[in-house]
Image (cartoon, helix red, strand yellow):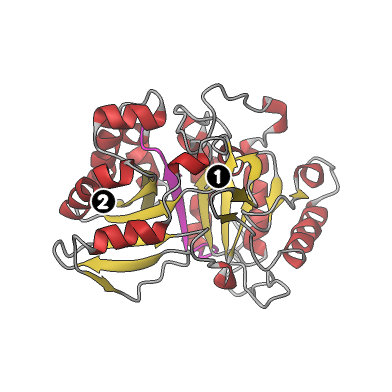
Amino acid sequence: MPGRRERNRTVKTNRQSPAKLTDTFGRAITYLRLSVTDRCDLRCTYCMSEHMTFLPRKDVLSLEETYRVAECFMRLGIRKLRLTGGEPLVRKNIMTLFAQLKPHLDAGDLDEVTLTTNGTLLARHAAGLKETGVRRVNVSLDTLDPEGYRAVTRWGDVNKVLAGIDAALAEGLSVKLNAVVQKGRFERDAMDLIAHAHGRGMDLTFIEAMPLGGALESYGENHLPLGEAEAWLKARYTLDPVAKKTGGPARYMRVRETGGLIGFIAPLSCNFCAACNRMRVSCTGQLFPCMGDDGAVDLRTALRSGEGPERLEQAILGAVAAKPWGHDFGYDGTVSGGLSRPMSHLGG
């Protein structure tokens, strides 16, 4: 953890600053997903290949550079920041970044800082996350079955994840579970996941797998359209639509039998781009205006140029101006619009 001087660092508030990040389609960009590493302690089959080649460390932004990116986005009106990976909690000294961001939460520059994690290291960091102002975490969990979990992650231990969830809940953090839908596994695991999540007061979101690098070869054999998954659930539960909005692409339904919420994110089956309010920065400092498009703007060069924050700000504004209307993912038995870039390079 940082020393007292760093923890008490004074920040300039942008509370009264109008949002400057509005794209050419009139969408206000208020949400940044910021990847801190491409590395992960798991090898989920829908995310990366078993024998991944990770990026050289010199190509990855330092934590101080990552903070400078976040600070610039805050000046431009970003209100919500989510740290992603790879697995963000494997990044050495990652808690120092959360500590640097906390004064911005206290000053009103940010509405929230959140985290997406696979949960394997969450037990170790739950208390520190709470201390640095994190109130919500998303945990990726596709199955409760130990053998099934080991199969989908290639070597993971589901008990570490469950312990992490326990620790987060004990700290008073709000936990949402994310489960990627895959043919065969969904039908085996969905009901157990719903019972587990709702029995502990957690929401659960089912996510349609995306055709990204590391999973393209097996995508066809594993792809289950989310519409089919939803129909399968409706045959077993009473699902009532709700108007809950979280600023993301999920639509929610309440399960009458449990009282809990389930969400659906369908990047292929349902194009949600019209309301997109987000951008993503990879761990190498590439700003992607759209997750489903290879177009990117290089922020790392601006960061390391020594020319001050103005160049970085102009690069960000240029990326917003170039933000496309939407992605062109598609699947009709063959992948169209798939990207060779692994999910781990950008974050979910």
Q: Report the residue at 74% width, 58% height from top.
A: 316
Query: Quick one: 55 or 145, which is closer to the camera?
Result: 145
Q: Report the residue at 49% width, 62% height from top.
A: 269
Under circle 2, the secondary element is: loop
- Residue 115 colored magenta? yes
Query: Quick one: 9 or 35, which is closer to the camera?
Result: 35
Residue 172, numbered label: 2
Please rate how many residues cluster around mark 2, counting C-alpha atoms within 10 Å: few if below 14, some from 14 to 19, many from 20.
few
Q: Report the residue at 63% width, 74% height from top.
A: 27
User: At label 1, which amino acid type do we have?
Assistant: Gly
Of discs 2 and 1, which sits in the foreground? 1
- Residue 285 colored magenta? no
Please rate how many residues cluster around mark 1, counting C-alpha atoms within 10 Å: few if below 14, some from 14 to 19, many from 20.
many
Query: Quick one: 341 or 219, which is closer to the camera?
Result: 219
In the picture, measured across the screen, residue 308 lies left or right of residue 172, that is right
Q: Is residue 283 above or below residue 279?
A: above
User: At label 2, which amino acid type do we have?
Assistant: Gly
Using the numbered discs, state the Cα–Cα distance from disc 2 to disc 1 in whole angstroms: 25 Å
- In the image, the segment drawn in magenta is 108-120
- Residue 39 in which image quadrant: top right
In the picture, measured across the screen, residue 256 lies left or right of residue 9, that is left
Residue 95 position, x and y percent, is: 47, 38
Residue 198 position, x and y percent, is: 20, 55
Return the residue at label 1: 347
Residue 240 position, x and y percent, is: 25, 73
